[in-house]
Image (cartoon, rainbow, N blue to C red):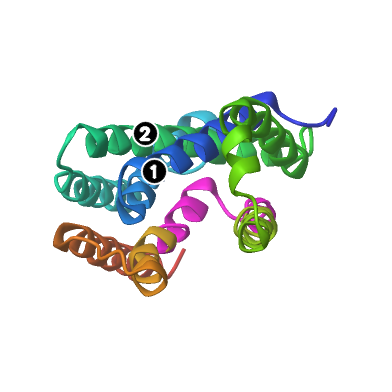
Amino acid sequence: LRKASWLTAIGYAGMIATFVLACKQTTAAQAIVLQYSGTAWVLLAGPRWLGEPFRWRDLAVAGVALLAMAMCAQEASGDAQLGGNALGAASGVCYAVTVVSMRRAVLRQGQHSAEASILLGNLLALAVCLPFGARELMQRVDAPSLLGLGYLGIVQIGAAYWAFARGLRTVPAATAALLALVEPVLTPLWVWLGTGERPGAATLVAGGVVVAALGWRAWAGRRD
């Protein structure tokens, strides 16, 4: 933990906590799409904070993605859902802080460890959130809940962010953030198959728009 970056850890803890709270107040599809609005901030911060080359096509993809997020947000109805959308957007800011600071640590040749920062971020999220959820957790704990929590902790969080941290060792932050946009595109499908929660038309269109923009970027940058 002595090699952990507090900036990365705080950004990561904020990203996790605000995303979970967003899922409680709006649809999972909207929450994940809004979280990945942080991709635009990653693209804008890369040249300034990481010294990575600026490409207009990256900015174009980010602009298209933001428009898609706006389409998704327009589906909100009621104060609760609007609050969930605000939390999702906040998660996007924290996501950008996490990605940029992790990549910055790599470029500084190991001054900080991404894995240590993620560990510290999870500990911070636990310390902040546990007092608010401990009673409910103890009242509702059972075997299916424990299996679900185990899967989320080991696979959806642990393995995923370990892989993401390893990827940031060899690819620019902008590329990593754009590749990760596959997640919000596929999430509405998994949620629909797993829970029956049907995403709205705007969310589906937003996902298709993001896929098309990523495909265009891959084609345009095939010689890079």
Horizontal side of 22 relative to 128 (left or right) equals: left
Question: Going by the image, does 173 lie left or right of 130?
Answer: left
Q: Position of residue 188 (x, y in %)?
A: 33, 64
Q: Which element is circle 2 on?
A: helix
Badge 2 density bin: few <14, some 14–19, many ≥20, Cα 10 Å: many
Residue 170, x across and y down, in percent:
65, 56
Q: Secondary structure at mark 1?
A: helix
User: Label 2 amino acid?
Assistant: Leu
Along the viewing direction, whichever of 152 and 1 lies nearer the viewer: 152
For residue 24, the mark is 1
Residue 46 in view here: no
Residue range corresponding to the magenta coloring: 161-182
Q: At 24% from the left edge and 62% from the top edge, which residue is drawn? A: 199
Q: Earlier in the sequence, mark 1 or mark 2?
A: 1
- Residue 205 appears at what percent x and percent y? 18, 63
Q: Residue 80, percent across and down?
A: 25, 35
Image point (20%, 32%), residue name: 79
Q: Give above or below for 118 relative to 3.
A: below
- Residue tagged 2: 87
> Quadrant location of the N terminus?
top right
Q: Quadrant of residue 91?
A: top left
Query: Mark 1 to mark 2: distance in Å?
Result: 10 Å
Q: Which mark is residue 89?
A: none
Q: Is residue 172 magenta?
A: yes
Label 1 or label 2, whichever lies nearer to me, is: 1
Occupied quadrant, residue 167: bottom right
Residue drawn 59% across and 30% down? Answer: 129
Label 1 amino acid? Lys
The answer to whether 113 is drawn above or below residue 142 in the figure is above
Asked whether 163 or 110 is in front, the reply is: 163
**Any magenta on residue 140?**
no
